[in-house]
Amino acid sequence: MRITAPAASIDGDRVSTAFEQWLSASGFSPHARVVDFRTPQSTGSGDIIWFVTVETANTNAGVSRSEWVLRLTRKSSGLRSPSLAVETMSALAGLIGVPRVLAIESDPTHLGSEFVVTERLRGRVAPDHPPYTFHGWLRDSPVEEQESIWWSAIEQISRLHRIDIRMPNFAYLFDGRAAVGCDDALSRLAPLAGDLPDGVRRKKILRLMTELTDRLPEAPTRHWLSWGDCRLPNMVVEGDSVVGLLDFEDVGVDDPMSDLATWLLQDEWYSKGLGLPRLPGFPSHAETIERYAELSGHEIRDLEWWRKFTILRFSLTRPLR
């Protein structure tokens, strides 16, 4: 079976059948049988995702069961790049908790889109649509557990920002696909802003872009990895600890303040921005900034610039929040 319809219109049953056929035809897992194929309850990604459980008959070991994530990827645009996301997960393996990449398929005719197969990390993901401040397991968790999850997230972000990307396995970040520095990031967003229809929103975004361009912060003395989508719904939680990071389509080389600003803004978006209270167990932003600086070793600077940059970036690459 070949699927040629746009990914958004693909029926899950058809994808399941086509995926099982691909497993055999590609040689990736020729004796596997799909026994469960479903969408996650929540995801922070704009990609189309399925949780897949397969059983494989082995001559000596009987039947083995594997749990994967099948992700249909979108085309690159602005600062978003599915190929960079896959390479970043591979580069980070063993350094921090990320899903292991199992297979990459660049032929879109199999499932109607290019796709990636990764292992499925065990744990829970905070709801994104509707957000975790509105309903779900995190909102219903004890205050002490909410606080522990928040601090665990800050520890993981700090750990990510201590990784030395001068290592050879991160060389792909400098091949021209990823933005390197805030000026490069702004230049990649400029065409998206220019394509906006005339109106109040376009004027506001162009005004903000001019302000940011005129007041570029001083470049850091070293290159650091910027996750680009540093939000709670992009983390896997087990118990009261964050065990994995997801969704690296926005990855770049930039000041770590970019991710810190995104983290603080997402907390505002999901609470004040929706007229909802913050979760009672979440520490204050002042406490968070202090703890992040202590754990990461990075100086806190130009945070307001990065806050405005994050607003600009999300306005151009995501639906309005």
Image (cartoon, rainbow, N blue to C red):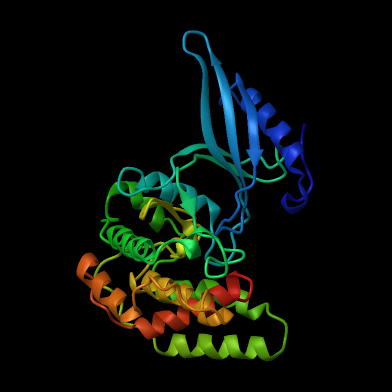
Q: Looking at the image, which is closer to me, 310 or 217?
A: 310
Tell me the quadrant of the picture where the C terminus can be found. Answer: bottom right
Q: Looking at the image, which is closer to me, 70 or 181?
A: 70
Q: Quadrant of residue 253?
A: bottom left
Q: Whole-percent x and y of residue 180?
A: 40, 67
Q: Looking at the image, which is closer to me, 277 or 179?
A: 277
Q: Quadrant of residue 315?
A: bottom right
Q: Is residue 283 above or below residue 159?
A: below
Q: Whole-percent x and y of residue 167?
A: 27, 50
Q: Residue at x 30, y 65 (%)?
A: 223
Number of marks in the rendered image = 0
Q: Residue at x 50, y 59 (%)?
A: 126
Residue 112 located left or right of residue 315: right
Return the residue found at the far top. 60
Q: Residue at x 63, y 45 (%)?
A: 114
Q: Quadrant of residue 227?
A: bottom left
Q: Is residue 185 above or below residue 303?
A: above
Residue 218 located left or right of residue 36: left
Q: Whole-percent x and y of residue 111?
A: 70, 40
Tell me the quadrant of the picture where the N terminus can be found. Answer: top right
Q: Is residue 252 above or below residue 271?
A: above
Residue 198 located left or right of residue 51: right
Q: Whole-percent x and y of residue 276?
A: 54, 79
